[in-house]
């Protein structure tokens, strides 16, 4: 079974890097989402992929693809198109997850900045625990420092 490496974020915003075994990329996306993660990147692990190096193996692969397409009633070209369409769909899903994560991150950052602004304003006007207005700057006497 192919191995897919992925980068994802959990609900707390922590990035994770891990791998998962899945039948295809769609299955990997579904398994990662079922863990409650926001998927950022997904790629098939090249180390576990079978490499075709000589011409006979490549020709055999093309022959098997032609036979499979003949049996299934589809042309090799249509099989390749389906594979490309599936890859585009996976990319679209990944982009949607990344966009959703960016929106959540922006919302959390906005709330954090709003709270920080409220705390800073309260501290500036010295109203954190007091209901008194701030002192008049003209009423403050300068300190006389003699040496």
Image (cartoon, rainbow, N blue to C red):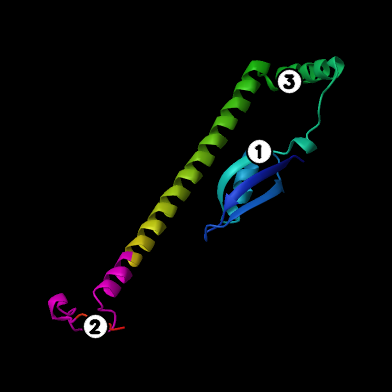
Helix, strand or loop under label 1:
strand
Residue 70 figure quarter: top right
Instruction: Name which residue lies at 59% across and 31% down.
Output: 87
Number of numbered discs on residues: 3
Numbered circle sitting on residue 71: 3
Q: Residue at x 28, y 82 (%)?
A: 145
Task: Give the alpha-carbon distance from disc 2 to disc 3, as whole Å.
Answer: 100 Å
Q: Residue furthest front?
A: 147
Where residue 33 appears, x then y in whole percent?
57, 51
In the rendering, at what x and y percent does residue 60 appear? 83, 18
The N terminus is located in which quarter?
top right
Which class describes the residues within 10 Å of circle 3: few (<14), some (14-19), or many (20+)? few
Query: What x and y, as percent, mark residue 12?
Result: 52, 61
Identify the magenta region.
117-141
Relative horizontal placement of residue 146, taking residue 30 as reference (left or right)? left
Quickly name the residue at label 1: 43
Rendered view: 44 above or below 38: above
Viewer-nearest of labels 2 and 1?
A: 2
Rendered-image quadrant of the C terminus? bottom left
* Proximity of marks 3 and 1: CB atoms separated by less than 8 Å: no
Tell whether label 3 touches label 2 (CB within 8 Å): no
Q: Nearer the viewer, mark 2 or mark 3?
A: 2
Q: Distance of mark 2 from mark 1, alpha carbons?
A: 72 Å
Nearest to N terminus: mark 2 or mark 1: 1
Q: Is residue 114 left or right of residue 34?
A: left
Q: Which residue matches tag 2?
A: 144
Which badge, 3 or 1, comes first in the chain's sequence? 1
């Amino acid at each position: 079974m192919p191995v897919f490496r992925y980068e994802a974020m959990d609900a707390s915003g922590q990035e994770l890097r891990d791998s998962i075994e899945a039948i295809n990329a769609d299955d990997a996306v579904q398994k990662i989402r079922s863990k409650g993660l926001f998927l950022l990147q997904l790629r098939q692990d090249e180390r576990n992929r079978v490499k075709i190096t000589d011409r006979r193996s490549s020709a055999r692969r093309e022959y098997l693809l032609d036979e499979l397409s003949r049996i299934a009633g589809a042309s090799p070209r249509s099989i390749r198109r389906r594979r490309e369409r599936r890859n585009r769909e996976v990319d679209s899903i990944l982009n949607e997850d990344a966009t959703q994560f960016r929106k959540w991150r922006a919302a959390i950052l906005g709330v954090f900045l709003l709270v920080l602004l409220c705390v800073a304003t309260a501290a500036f006007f010295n109203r954190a625990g007091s209901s008194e207005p701030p002192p008049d700057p003209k009423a403050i006497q300068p300190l006389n420092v003699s040496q």
